Amino acid sequence: MLDCGMHMGFNDDRRFPDFSYITQNGRLTDFLDCVIISHFHLDHCGALPYFSEMVGYDGPIYMTHPTQAICPILLEDYRKIAVDKKGEANFFTSQMIKDCMKKVVAVHLHQTVQVDDELEIKAYYAGHVLGAAMFQIKVGSESVVYTGDYNMTPDRHLGAAWIDRCRPNLLITESTYATTIRDSKRCRERDFLKKVHETVERGGKVLIPVFALGRAQELCILLETFWERMNLKVPIYFSTGLTEKANHYYKLFITWTNQKIRKTFVQRNMFEFKHIKAFDRAFADNPGPMVVFATPGMLHAGQSLQIFRKWAGNEKNMVIMPGYCVQGTVGHKILSGQRKLEMEGRQVLEVKMQVEYMSFSAHADAKGIMQLVGQAEPENVLLVHGEAKKMEFLRQKIEQEFRVSCYMPANGETVTLPTSPNIPVGISLGLLKREMAQGLLPETKKPRLLHGTLIMKDSNLRLVSSEQALKELGLAEHQLRFTCRVHLQDTRKEQETALRVYSHLKSTLKDHCVQHLPDGSVTVESILIQAAAHSEDPGTKVLLVSWTYQDEELGSFLTALLKKGLPQAPS
Amino acid sequence: MDPECSRLLPALCAALADPRQPLADDTCLEKLLDWFKTVTEAESSLLLLQENPALVELLSHVLKSQDMSSRVLSFSLRLAGTFAAQEDCFLYLQQGELLLGLFGEGGPQCWAAWSVPTVRSGWIQGLRSLAQHPCALHFLADSGAVDTIFSLQGDPSLFVASAASQLLVHTLALSMQAGATGCSGLWDGVWPACAQKIMGHLEESLQSTAAPQVTQALNVLTSTFGRCHSPWTETLWGQLCPLVARLLERTPIPAAHSLVDLLLSVARSPALSSSHGRLWEAVAQALRCLSPMQAGSLALGMLKLPHCPQALRVQAFGVLLQPLACVVKATAQAPGPPGCSMWPPGWLDGAEGSSLTVDTLLSSKSACVGILCQTLAQLEELQPLPQRPAPWPQEPLLGAAVTILRLCHGSATSSSSGGGRLCATLAGCVRVQRAALDFLGTLSQETRSQELEKEVFAVLSEYLGSPDSSPTVLKKAFQTTLRWLLSSPRTPGCPDLGPQPLLFLRELFPVLQKRLCSPSWEVRDSVLEFLTQLSRHWGGQADFRRALLASEVPTLTQQLLQDPESYVRASAVAAAGQLSSRGLQAAPDSPEHPQAQQGLLGELLCILSTDSEGFPRRAVVQVFTEWLRDGHADVARDTEWFIATVLQVVSQDLDWEVRVQGLELAQVFLVQRLGQPRCPYMVALPEAASATPIPEVLQSLCRLRLFDFAFRALLDCDRPVAQKACELLLFLKDKTAMCGGLQEAGDIPGSASGQVTLQRWRAGEQGQLPGDLQPEAMLALLRSTDLEGLQARLAQSSDHMEKSPQSLLQDMLATVGVLGENEADCY
């Protein structure tokens, strides 16, 4: 199973996948060899504790080391929000998250992991967020690459996705930005910094609601470097204790970040922020400008909502929403332009502060997706994680440019792909030696035809000489001969006819061994020709031609030749 | 319907009908449907449509317009079905030919949008909603919908295909229900036309050579027998039983998995009591000829039935035991080792003649692993059931589980070729190890011989000590060990452990010691969890105490309070807390552990105030609460100081769960001082439970700033904190109800400023309650605060506004036109 995510837009059963489609009565573990998680975002891992601890999957779970470290932080963050907000009882607990994480087998990039005798997986760097990976899944000679979310352009803290030319049968790629060629990231960053700067310059406060990990770190680096460059003194706060752990992991997994960060790591760790300090609840009332990163990211509960309520009434302030908000949340409402919000107890909150949306999500754009398809050279492409209309555009583009089939199934739809798998066959040494003995040296680039008997035994295929096959299988040899009668107009005796046939063949088939045997029959290699009188017509002789399977070609040729008749005898 | 919603509906319907208006969020339409379902459950759909003509206009518009988005089209189909579920509304919609247009042959099936699975799914779900009354049934039959449903059973979309099957089941049941005649409502034996059509289709499908068609028919029947228990189901089975039996004669058996499901569904149906004879024959045949994997599932299902014939039970149990019998047989050293002789006569032989032999078991590694895991899980499921076979072959099963674990671990040797191959197949197989350990754990609940118990502890020792055991296997091994240790029989009247556990314990602690130093946090954590559980149960056992204290486990546990991994720190806190309550902590004068000097209490307080992670801090408060409950010596020494210190630290915590737990601690303290909360149904007793006089308690609460903590928590931005604080203050209010409360809040010094502070807090500002507040002021503040009202408000989910239909409609309308800017962008 590739990823095990959740839908944050629902609060009921619909937020998790309906696993009963896998099996209704059986145990899930019997139906799945493993679960692979591409990265720590909740739409890719949010249902994992539910799946492993509540639905009952008990098999292995694979993810990269950073994902294993960070995943529980986000799950815990989400659990707290869900329980805080709704007081939900039927929700996974901290203990379940821990027990789930204990089942995880962490993998390194480019390490081939043998899941079982038949299945192997390998992770590739995907950019997007810390620890994100694309996975190649291989069974025998057939393989699938699943990208998860990826980014083909490096950003401030991560590098670009990369995969080798692995030529999978199928590439399953995300297609969030299937039609977009993203505007320059620099522009967006400049825009963001300008807005923050202007607001604090005029004494306003900036609220940036974020989830504990991911985009928050990128924005922190952005602001930190800008503050440093501009020598700004306005305080920046990060409102949650989670950052410390997040930053710890960014430091720990420095090899997963981009080159620039890795290079400067020796002089200064990018994630040790000079300007960004921990937030205390009391600070929100402080006069003067400040920038606060607060969780959760959709302004639907907790601290970010509390700060928002305090600051919303002042037009000097600003809230910057750096990501998607689900319907019903305050984040969604203000993004859609609602300025009067009904809060608990029929209170109405008037939003006077400025509201900005600034997407920083790190997905590959259409160009990036095409680039990845070009890199991996798949036989087929399957688009997921996107909108149908945009996917359709990309599908056509991929099919045109790469001449491969591209699919975009709806949820729950089955796609069947024809493949021609390579089946490895062992060749016996005896057979090879015999082939060598014939004096034909093998050439590496030229395919060569090799005759033998294919034996399937214990799920193994071997090509051996027919003698060996007979011996191994305890079978007796049978010879198969083809026979044919050719009628010739010849009044002479049978022996003479045979002699004429011999002379004719001798002169025609110069490269073959033609013999006239004492019993009057003629042989060409394994082909035997006998002449007999016709029972009814004395003016006709019947040639009995027989040949073995191995000489079928020659046999057919001879019969065709003889059917044309013999040359006139010299007078 | 709420008038505000009624007001917003026309604009929303217009927006939905406008194909140029994309929808904000794919959840909106789902939520909108949810809301309409709730509304139509409470009021008349007909009235709703008449009062809100925009809804019918939307449906009509869908019919006319071909360029609707597939999502809105699907939504409209489902909406129409929801309304038409009520017969009068159905007739109303039919008059306008709306239903025929939406669900009839000339409807969406002819549109280009039909190729989108969402639309097909919406069509089926719409029909499923409306199929509630006889009129709907006629409609289904006349409109040609049934034939479309047949074809949709094979839809490439899993969801559509599944929904189509479910709709067939529903239609069949509805049709039979409508066919029931007379006042008795009993079925008169004549199949209604619609039901006949479906029956014909099912019969045809069952005879098909195409496996998918057979599967579809079997799935429909499985659901039918699972859901409908009316007498007609018996006739249905009687008619189809021969066709099902014929499937078992085919090679290979088609749709074996679905066939098993059907047989089980029929067997479980209470309506089929008199037709069971033919069923049992079919089951017996299936058990003989299905593959071991499928036969296993059928066998387990049969054994779970309360009324399965004995002969079939024996056959089924034999099937279930076969794989284990094969393992025992393959590994048996001639002549007859103990493992073999334990098996009931006939079972090992039976295995030989059955479909599963050692050779087939070993034909491929994945098949062997699959079947062993399944069998072990099935036997684990069967073991605790009252209807499990008796006598339960406890000893052979234990022997088999131990053998499998040894084979996986490589410690079993076998001279036979089958045994050798099994060794090679199972060596290091984590899946089988985990399944076998789980099963072994379940078997701990039964009586066992000393000899076998020794074997079990020996194999568990191997697993716990082996460097090859993976963290997940180790965790299972710890869980199994715990189950075996805790269920170990003791000599009556003697508090000591049995000889086997005692021997095992001596070996266990050095292993735990080693494991506590494991580089894998999963392992360290599992050991600590195990240790906590073990000490909780055996902390008072002299033998256990001796063995534990002779090891370095307590010291290592305390060292792990500084572990880099927060999960481990939290588990170490729990373990150290448990050991300490049992007087099993590390020697305090340990020179290499300077923190031991300050005592565990100090160290835990330090974690509570400085640890950057929530888990260890939460674990500390939990330990403190337990200590307070149990009267731990460190707490009892100066309880007031303890409470004051903990609450002060907790009130600053960023993690709301720590704050909730702090309130829990405060509540335990209050109960100890003031007695249990009064139960409204309890006969009033004199207030003798409270050991301390109330005024004195109140004084101390003021000194401890407990009021301050609770009132602040009352206005916490995290709802559970406020809820807990409310509960605590209500308890206090109740307990102090009889205590000198004649004065009004305003008359008491300090109370007014308290009120002001509360109001400021409510407005989100900072500040403190006056430090020198007297109990009277506190009481007055308590009484003047509307705690009951607050509790009711808090009980409502904080997102009740967010979830309200007005909010949904407003959000959907607000999105109209602005969407292009903020494109959906998930993460």
Image (cartoon, grey):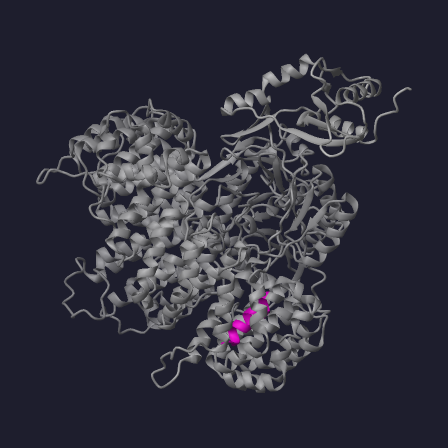
Indicate left or right for B343 with B11 as reference: left
Whether the magenta-drawn stretch holds residue B123 is answered as yes
Q: Is residue B642 above or below residue A502?
A: below
- Residue toward you, B167 or B597: B167
Where residue A552 sits, quadrant-wise, is top right
Is residue B777 among what the camera can see? Answer: no
Question: In the orientation shown, which residue stands out farthest toward the right?
Answer: A571
Indicate left or right for A417 with A62 as reference: right
Is residue A357 among what the camera can see? Answer: yes
- Residue toward you, A8 or B557: A8
- Residue toward you, B66 or B742: B66
Q: Which residues are magenta?
A: B121-131
How far across and how far down the image is residue B658, in percent?
A: 39, 50
| Image quadrant occupied by the C terminus of chain A | top right
Question: In the orientation shown, which residue stands out farthest toward the left?
Answer: B493
Q: Is residue A484 above or below residue A150?
A: above
How far across and how far down the image is residue B486, in percent?
A: 22, 40
* Chief SS of the magenta region: helix
Q: Is residue B727 above or below residue A543?
A: below
How far across and how far down the image is residue A38, in percent?
A: 57, 43
Which residue is drawn at the image coordinates 29% and 57% (left, top)?
B305
- Residue toward you, B556 or A128: A128
